[in-house]
Image (cartoon, rainbow, N blue to C red):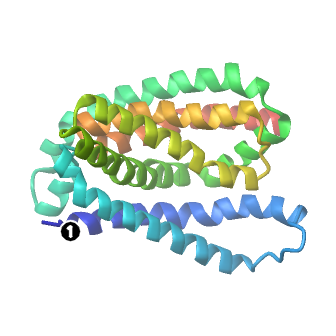
């Protein structure tokens, strides 16, 4: 039976991230588009763009929340924290087993990524791409990263997309085996990386092999961590780890951004 309370809860916690992030992303993209408008195209007024983008994002997250609510439990994917929240169960008992794995995954995963980004990728990317990516992240601010990245993206990618892929894979394999889950984790990570490309290209990133490699590999790395946490401990462990990922990364981002813009 479809759990409408759980669906509405997940939709509700995802909405603030959309409201915070979308206008800020459009502010960054607008500067690039206005300075280099597409030939023969008229840019809609900014309020119209904001309404369209927020409406589209809310529609997408509603679909993801509904899909996950419909199929996740069929393939043993859980969200004990949110289930306790809507059912009146013990929130602490649901949350407690997820805290340590989320801390390890979020902090450890971010440290590995930060080292790879600043030692391998960033020095080899062109200046325009680096500036465009970092302008997008700076525009989001800490709340955009936490609410949109930590909550919205996890409900969309793990609860919606990954659950759907595991369910489809289990239909073919006859059971949600570990192999099916890992394939779903990898595919969802690659698709999510590709999904980041339009906004980054619109903001001025150059479609170079190094940029494409970074976009896919970084999101795949995150998917391996957050997907495993979701699989083993529940959705909120992936959300906590994703939030920590951005919190640990932010001081490094601020340092290099300010250094290069001074």
The residue that mark 1 highlights is 5
Left or right side of 109 for 205 = right
Q: Residue at x 69, y 20 (%)?
A: 120
Q: Position of residue 202 (x, y in %)?
A: 75, 56
Quarter occupied by residue 116:
top right
Quarter occupied by residue 253:
top right
Q: Secondary structure at mark 1?
A: helix
Q: Position of residue 256 (x, y in %)?
A: 73, 32
* In front of the other: 259 or 188: 188
Quarter occupied by residue 26:
bottom right
Q: Residue at x 77, y 38 (%)?
A: 130
Q: How many marks?
A: 1
Q: Position of residue 251 (x, y in %)?
A: 61, 34
Q: Position of residue 248 (x, y in %)?
A: 52, 33
Left or right side of 22 for 78 = left
Q: Residue at x 17, y 62 (%)?
A: 86
The answer to whether any part of residue 58 appears in the image is yes
């Amino acid at each position: 039976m479809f759990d409408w309370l759980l669906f509405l809860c997940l939709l509700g916690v995802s909405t603030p991230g959309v409201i915070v992030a979308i206008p800020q992303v459009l502010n960054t993209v607008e500067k690039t588009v206005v300075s280099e408008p597409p030939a023969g195209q008229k840019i809609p007024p900014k309020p119209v763009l904001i309404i369209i983008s927020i409406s589209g994002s809310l529609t997408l997250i509603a679909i993801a929340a509904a899909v996950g609510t419909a199929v996740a439990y069929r393939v043993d994917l859980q969200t004990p924290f949110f289930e306790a929240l809507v059912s009146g169960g013990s929130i602490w008992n649901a949350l407690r087993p997820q805290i340590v794995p989320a801390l390890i995954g979020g902090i450890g995963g971010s440290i590995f990524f930060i080292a790879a980004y600043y030692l391998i990728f960033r020095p080899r990317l062109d200046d325009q791409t680096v500036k465009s990516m970092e302008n997008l992240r700076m525009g989001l601010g800490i709340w955009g990263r936490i609410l949109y990245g930590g909550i919205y993206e996890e409900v969309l990618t793990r609860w919606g997309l990954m659950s759907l892929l595991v369910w489809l894979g289990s239909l073919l394999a006859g059971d949600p085996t570990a192999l099916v889950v890992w394939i779903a984790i990898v595919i969802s990570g690659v698709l999510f990386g590709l999904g980041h490309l339009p906004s980054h290209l619109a903001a001025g990133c150059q479609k170079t092999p190094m940029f494409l490699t970074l976009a896919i590999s970084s999101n795949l790395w995150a998917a391996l961590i957050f997907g495993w946490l979701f699989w083993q401990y529940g959705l909120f462990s992936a959300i906590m780890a994703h939030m920590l990922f951005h919190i640990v990364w932010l001081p490094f981002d601020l340092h290099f951004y300010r250094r290069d813009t001074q």
